[in-house]
Image (cartoon, rainbow, N blue to C red):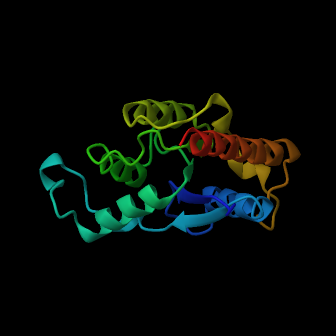
Amino acid sequence: MSKPNILCISGSLRQGSSNGKILAYIAQQLNTEANFEVYNGLDGLPFFSPERDTQPAHSNVADFRKQLQQADGILICTPEYAFGVPGVLKNALDWTVSSAEFSRKPLALITASSVGENGHKALLNTFVALDADISEEAKLLVPFIRSKFDAEGKLKDEKVMADIVATTKALLGTMQQAQNAH
C-alpha cells in the first residue's frame, strides 16, 4: 500500500513562522508514514465573495481545490491573529464552502500561537460548517508557542513535540478509517 498524502497548510505567511517550523517538524518525524506537501498559495487566492465563486473558478482557487481533493488528509497549523482566524486562512476556507472539498475529509488542526483559544474555537466552528472529519485527538492548541523553540529555531519542548506527533497520528488514524470505509 502506498503512503497517504497529507496537504499541510500554514495559517501564517511569515517566513520562518512557528507554524511552518511545526509542519516541517511533522514531515521530518513522520515521513515514513505519509507524504507531506505544503500548500504555499494562500496569498495568491483572490478575496472571497459569493458572486465571485463562478465556473470556471479563478485559476488559483481551482488549483487550491484540486490539491484539497487529491489529498487523503489535511493538516492545518495556524497562529491566532487579533483573537481570531488569520484572514488569509479564513479566505481560503471560504472558497471551499460551495465546492465542499472539506466535506468528510480527514483533518487535523494545530493552533500554535501566543494564546490561540479564540482562533482555535473559531476554526473548529468553521470546520463544523465545512463538514470536515476531525476527531478530538486531531485537535491541538499550543499556547506560548515561541517559548517552545530554542535559539536555533528548533522545537525543544518534549511534551509539545509528543503532542504534535500524537495529533498527526490521530489524523493518520482517521485517514485509515476513511480508507477502510470505502
Q: Is residue 166 left or right of residue 70?
A: right
Whether residue 21 is visible to the viewer of this picture, yes or no, is: yes
Residue 73, position as x, y percentages in the image: 56, 51
Displayed quadrant of residue 5: bottom right
Q: Residue at x 44, y 42 (%)?
A: 85
Displayed quadrant of residue 141: top right
Whether residue 140 is visible to the viewer of this picture, yes or no, is: no
Q: Residue at x 30, y 43 (%)?
A: 97
Displayed quadrant of residue 52: bottom left
How many discs mark residues in the rendered view?
0
Residue 175, position as x, y percentages in the image: 61, 45
Quarter of the rendering occupied by the N terminus: bottom right
Residue furthest to the left = 51
Q: Residue at x 44, y 63 (%)?
A: 67
Q: Is residue 164 left or right of residue 157?
A: left
Residue 126, position as x, y percentages in the image: 41, 35
Residue 26, position as x, y percentages in the image: 72, 57
Instruction: Identify which residue, 18 or 138, lies in the foreground.
Output: 138
